[in-house]
Image (cartoon, rainbow, N blue to C red):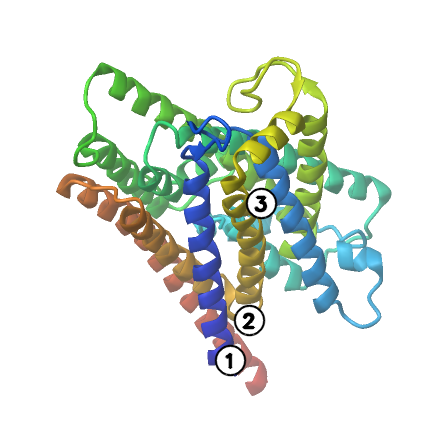
Amino acid sequence: MSFLRLIVCVAGVYSMFLIWAIAQERLSVPFLNIVTGKPEKFKSVLLLNTAQSAASALSALTYMLLRKKSGASLKEMLGLAVTTSHSAKANGHTKANGHSNGHAKGHANGHANGHANGHANGSAKDSSAKPFTLDDRRNLMFRFLQCALFITTAAPFGFASLSHISYPTMVLGKSCKLVPVMIMNVLLYRRKFAAHKYLVVAMVTAGITMFMAFGEQGQKHGKGAAQSSLWGLFLLIVNLAIDGATNSTQDEIFSKYKVTGQQMMFWINLFSTFVTSLLLVFPLPHIPTIHPGTNWEREIVQAWDFIQTHPSVVMPLAQFALTGALGQLFIFETLQHFGSLTLVTITLTRKLFTMLLSVIVYRHRLTPGAWLGAGVVFAGISVEAYVKRRDVHAKRVMQEKEKAKIKDL
């Protein structure tokens, strides 16, 4: 039964996020206008984010309702009756081993590293726990809102970067999320990291540099193409930097409050849906990447007009929202029954297959140097996974020895 559950979880994560990745790349290329016959790009990132966050909030709520313990109140189910912990500092150092675990969301991406830590922290007993006050609840909600604002701001930069760099480049860039996460943890929360993480950072940075330098076969060269690639890389770096702030804030939440990944997923996506819905319906000035449309026109109007004249956008838009939300459910199921180590392995290989699938489906022709750069990136991530696996094994051995001592007593 356990093996069958693992097969289902692996199949679910792979199938949902591979479809999600293909849909995301499809949304970055032009769609045919049925009126004029001209291809035009879908630019409403706000609608994209709203659909994704609404579906994710709904899936998280459904998951919590299905997994709700008998006798648990609504507040307990939603994480509004949790306890705070005085041992936040200790928990923060414990989680330092997992910062490159992939965050499947996307932010559908899913925030796997934060969720893995939340699952572990939420199930651990803390002798120094204290009652959850009204101020604690307000602070927790503020942190959730902060994460939602970070995610809402970061997503347009990532989507806009696809107009200037290839999807495989973006996948590799996302694989380097450890770098901004480390930087933001040091800058915002003064955390320290193990020595091997700096080796990982060096490897993934070198790999990305090689991948960008060698590029794709048949890629256009010259000043204009170079400037476009550099601009796309800049947009991706901004996206990763804001993602790093999001992830470090999530780690801070998990170190102070006993909330589960499902509860965090629900509240952050609920706040994200609220924020992006407001931005959709209110007139906004022209804001690059966030509101690239007509000045002071409501985004929802422009998005609806685009859908009416480009009906082929509906399918990838629905695939993007639904598969991202469903994929997160498989992530939580994997965490609950098999732990974060198994999830790291799954997400690592999933990123590799995502890049390969993008190369096959959209016929990206990579040079040998680009493949070598990709290999260096995944080798760096594999070092992180290996060290984490070794640490987890050592911890289990220590726990078994302690249990044996207790039995002897």
Q: Where in the figure is residue 22, as x and y percent of width and height?
A: 41, 48
> Mark 3 highlights which residue?
251
Label number found at residue 337: 2
From mark 1 to mark 3, how far is it between C-alphas? 29 Å
Q: Where in the figure is residue 123, as x and y percent of width and height?
A: 65, 64
Location of residue 57 with respect to 370 vertically, above or below: below
Location of residue 68 with respect to 275 vertically, above or below: below
Farthest residue toward the left? Answer: 368
**Which residue corresponds to the image point at 36% horizontal and 21% vertical from the top-left?**
231
User: Label 2 sits on what residue type?
Assistant: His
SS for tag 1? helix
> Mark 1 highlights which residue?
2
SS for tag 2? helix
Q: Residues within 10 Å of mark 1 (few under 14, many from 20)?
A: few
On the question of residue 25 being in view, the answer is yes
Q: Earlier in the sequence, mark 1 or mark 2?
A: 1
User: Label 1 sits on what residue type?
Assistant: Ser
- Nearer the observer, disc 1 or disc 3? 1
Q: Earlier in the sequence, mark 1 or mark 3?
A: 1
Of residues 405 and 189, which is closer to you in this image?
A: 189
From mark 1 to mark 2, how far is it between C-alphas? 8 Å
Q: Left or right: where does residue 27 sit relative to residue 332?
A: left
User: Label 3 sits on what residue type?
Assistant: Asp
- Cβ atoms under marks 1 and 2 closer than 8 Å: yes
SS for tag 3? helix
